[in-house]
Image (cartoon, rainbow, N blue to C red):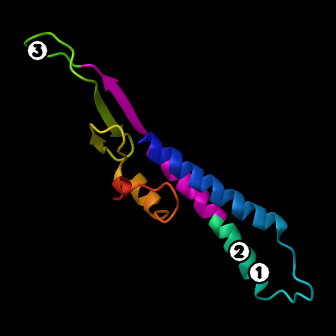
Amino acid sequence: MDDLVTWLRGVLDEEHRRYQDQILDWQEPEGWDGGDHVDDLHYLRWHSADIEAKRAILNLHFVTVRTRTPFDPYTGERRGPAHDVDCGACGWASSDPTSACETVRLLASAYKDRPGYRNEWRP
């Protein structure tokens, strides 16, 4: 799961930087009459706000991974590590530490064409 969240945060950070740079670089076109180019700036600001909302959703659906070492009840020997994975926001749970809740997977799926996206992250 950390890989998915780390990857998605990186993608969102890259997108946010790109839109913020374009907003900062935006200038009124020469001879501008107040028409269509306002839509360009609105589009950039909307995308920047959209990324902030996705970051907030990602923070809300923070997945916790707890590792425990179970013991065999008959021999007392340690078994391999076991994981309790859950999302405090939606109640999702798993034993796979590389997994994430459906909400996080859906957010990431919008960027499935980006380098680093893995098929096992698909919702």
Check if mark 2's residue and mark 1's residue have beta carbons within 8 Å: yes
Disc 3 designates what residue?
A: 73
**Residue depth check, mark 3 versus mark 2: number of the one nearer the observer:** 3
Was residue 50 drawn as part of the magenta stretch in this picture? yes
Label 2: which residue?
A: 42
Give the spatial CA distance, label 2 vs label 1.
6 Å
Residue 82 pos. (x, y %): 27, 27
Q: Earlier in the sequence, mark 3 or mark 2?
A: 2
Q: CA distance from mark 3 to mark 2?
A: 63 Å
> Which x, y percent locates residue 103?
39, 55
Q: Identify the residue at horizontal 35%, vertical 47% (top origin).
A: 90
Query: Which range of residues does the magenta coloring cover?
Result: 48-69
Point out the image quarter for the C terminus.
Answer: bottom left
Disc 3 + disc 1, Cβ < 8 Å: no
Q: Which residue is mark 1?
A: 38
Kind of residue at disc 1: Val
* 76 up-or-down from 114: above or below: above
The quadrant of the image that shows the N terminus is top left
In this rendering, is residue 61 above or below 27?
above
Taking 109 as reference, is 15 left or right? right
